[in-house]
Image: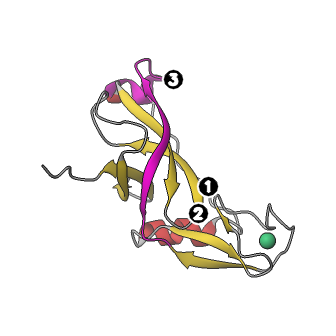
Amino acid sequence: MDKPSPSPNPVSRPFREACGREELVYQHCAGCGSAQYYPRSLCTHCSSAALEWRVSTGRGTVYSYTDVFRAPNEAFKADVPYVIAVIDVTEGFRVLTNVLAETGKVKIGSGVHAVFEDRGAVKLLQFALDTQSG
Ligand SMILES: [Zn+2]
């Protein structure tokens, strides 16, 4: 069994293409100034359709996380244990993602940065822990 792959639609295609360039992009609302992720056709704050794409620094902190010890299916068996987290990205949006780190190393507030997993036809957004100093 292969891991599932995203199927881009007209709304999400710019995001998926940016992942291919190893860039994290998000939607910025020209109507109210909100940042939005994941891609949608309208702003979730003010319902404006005036959404523009911006490039994120890809930097953030862990808002919450969980360690996964039981694979949801055969495709993920070799990956356990792994970490799923909600990341507060610097530009003001949250991403539900994997953090590529050993379980026990990720903490609430840990600094992270975007990385991209090459799965052949697509590159997937994930995050990794910032290098600790000291
Ligand atoms: Zn808005």
- In-front residue for pair 85/119: 85
- In-front residue for pair 24/63: 63
Give whichever of discs 1 and 2 has the lower sequence position: 1
Q: Residue furthest front?
A: 134
Q: Amino acid type of disc 2?
A: Gly
Mark 2: secondary structure? loop
Magenta range: 56-78
For label 1, the residue is 7
Q: Amino acid type of disc 1?
A: Ser
Q: Would you say 41 lies left or right of 66 here?
A: right
Q: Can you say whether 36 is above or below 109 in the image?
A: below
Q: In the rendered image, which quarter is residue 118 located in?
A: bottom left
The answer for how far apart the CA atoms under marks 3 and 2 are is 30 Å
For label 2, the residue is 92
Give the residue at x 35% y 58%.
Answer: 115
Q: Position of residue 17 (x, y in %)?
A: 52, 71
- Label 3: few (<14), some (14–19) or many (≥20) C-alpha neighbours in 10 Å: few
- In-front residue for pair 102/119: 102
Q: Are marks 3 and 1 in contact (CB under 8 Å)?
A: no
The answer as to whether callout 3 falls within 8 Å of ligand 1 is no
For label 3, the residue is 72
Mark 1: secondary structure? loop
Give whichever of discs 3 and 2 has the lower sequence position: 3
Q: Which mark is residue 125?
A: none
The answer as to whether callout 1 falls within 8 Å of ligand 1 is no
Give whichever of discs 3 and 1 has the lower sequence position: 1
Q: Position of residue 126 (x, y in %)?
A: 42, 51
Q: Amino acid type of disc 3?
A: Pro
Residue 3 appears in view: no
The answer for how far apart the CA atoms under marks 3 and 1 are is 20 Å
